[in-house]
Amino acid sequence: MIGKVIGALVGAEVEKRRQQSGLKGAVVGAMAVGLMRRLGPIGLALGGAYAAKKAYDRRKDGAIAA
């Protein structure tokens, strides 16, 4: 279940970068979930680290009002 959440976050980051909503983010998120499952705990850590880094960068730039 955590892998699906991280996959959704990765897909959302792809769509935010493109400034669009569509199928590409969903496909990338689904592929990320499959890749994380194959890599096991290392894949889960990599996917979580990617999503956390993007959220940190966005917060540091002031895109999220705290």
Image (spheres, rainbow, N blue to C red):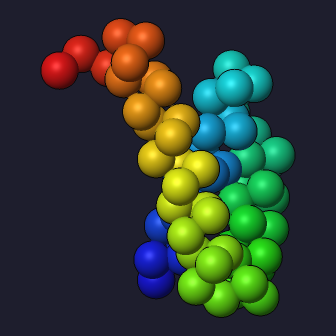
* Position in image of residue 2 (x %, y %): 45, 77
Q: Is residue 11 above or below residue 36?
A: above
Q: Position of residue 21 (x, y in %)?
A: 68, 33
55 displayed left or right of 29: left
- As drawn, which residue projects farthest toward the front? 42
Q: Quadrant of residue 56?
A: top left
Residue 7 shows in the view: no
Along the horizontal axis of the image, is 15 left or right of 61? right
Observer able to see residue 10: yes
- Is 56 placed above or below 4 here? above
Q: Nearer the viewer, residue 11 or 23?
A: 11
Q: Residue furthest top?
A: 62
Tell me the quarter of the picture where residue 14 sits.
Answer: top right
Please state which of residues 48 and 28 is positioned toward the viewer in this rendering: 48
| Left or right, 26 with reference to 9 | right
Against 19, residue 29 (above or below) is below
Please give the name of the residue rendered at 73% of the width and 47% of the height, measured from the top-left corner: 25
- Residue at point 80%, 58% (across, down): 27
Residue 16 vs residue 49, the one in the foreground:
49
Q: How many marks?
A: 0
Position of 44 relative to 41 (above/below): above
Tell me the residue at 17%/20% (across/down): 66
Q: Residue at x 46, y 47 (%)?
A: 52
